[in-house]
Amino acid sequence: MTKITAYGVRPIEKPYFDKLNKYNFEMTYVEDLLTHDNVEAAKGTDAVLVRGNCVVDRQNLEKFAAWGIKRVFTRSVGYNHMDLQSAAELGIQMARVPGYSPYAVAELAFTLGMTLFRHVNLGISQTRQGNFTISPAMFSKEIHTATVGIVGIGRIGYTEAKLYKALGAKIVAYDPYPSDAAKDLAEMGTLEDVLQQSDIVSIHVPYFPGKNEDLVDASFISKMKPGAVLINTARGELANVDAILNGLDTDQISGYGADVVDDEVNIIGKSFDTEAAIPDAGVRRLVAANPKVLITPHVGSYTEPALEDMISISYDNFNEALTTGTTKNEIKAK
């Protein structure tokens, strides 16, 4: 029986891992993300399953290789945390989950967008302090009169666009390679066109290290429609914190909602006693900018359908690799 150690398995997730284990793998669950401190938990097993923000660097991979572990897979779409080059050199196979329920992230992006668009967080922040006055900052459009811009209208962006479209919003989108379905749903345009028109801009593009850091910079913000809302559920590295905060200070944008931040390995999944204890200065500043800024702790994919997809596909990846030597979802160094 194949033994697999799975890192980052929350207690609520264990019953799903057990229920979906149709290949009868012998599973060991580690609640914490993989780090240098808990790598020993995998010793004696045949394979490892991680998720985003696990430390899958050369140091840990060398230990896995020394213990005879030949497969280290991730149950996430992104794999920036995986050292593909070291894995190749050490003879370790890697694979990912290419996709899961697009509604998971799309619904959260939609929720963040509507919360800021209708100034719900501002209202709640005031009433929690006993202030029930209505300020000019709470004045709002209605979504059926608004334009929503989707930057990257793949599976998730398309799904979010459908949610807004159902409420009567006009949908515009920028994507170098849009599907026919996306072109039927949205009015396609240049990035500048989308930014200039949109009351809400939602970002759904992949992060390519060294290529599109700070995609959302001062120039990006300056091209947005004054007073628009910006949503980022893609990657924290895509957004320049200085540019966003300056945009909020000058009222160029009215709100920023994100499910992602920089330095997630040292932040997500951790609890800090005070705001000042957050180890990243940019994240501290964003948190302090509430209610104009809404930050959620990377929970976009934390839904039942998405979890079941991630687990099932991961199990299929292991079974396919064990029976055929490879898997269609294998990832390799370029």
Image: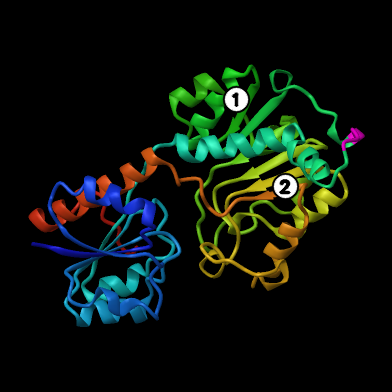
State left or right for residue 260 relative to residue 321: right
Query: Bounds of the magenta span?
Result: 132-136
Which amino acid type is shown beneath numbered disc 2?
Answer: Phe
Quarter of the image with the C terminus is bottom left
User: In front here: 109 or 125?
Assistant: 125
Which residue: 37% across, 57% down?
A: 11
Q: Position of residue 149 (x, y in %)?
A: 64, 32
Colour scheme of this structure image? rainbow
Q: Position of residue 307 (x, y in %)?
A: 36, 45
Which amino acid type is shown beneath numbered disc 1?
Answer: Tyr
Dot in front, 2 or 1 = 1
Q: Position of residue 117 (x, y in %)?
A: 73, 33
Q: Which residue is mark 2?
A: 220
Which residue: 50% across, 45% down?
A: 300
Quarter of the image with the N terminus is bottom left
Which residue: 64% across, 16% down?
A: 168
Disc 2 secondary structure class: helix
Q: Which residue is mark 1?
A: 164
Residue at the limit of the structure toward the front, as seen here? 130
Q: CA distance from mark 2 to mark 1?
A: 23 Å
Instruction: Indicate whether residue 133 is drawn in magenta.
Output: yes
Instruction: Indicate whether residue 188 is drawn in magenta.
Output: no
Up/down of 40 relative to 142, above or below: below
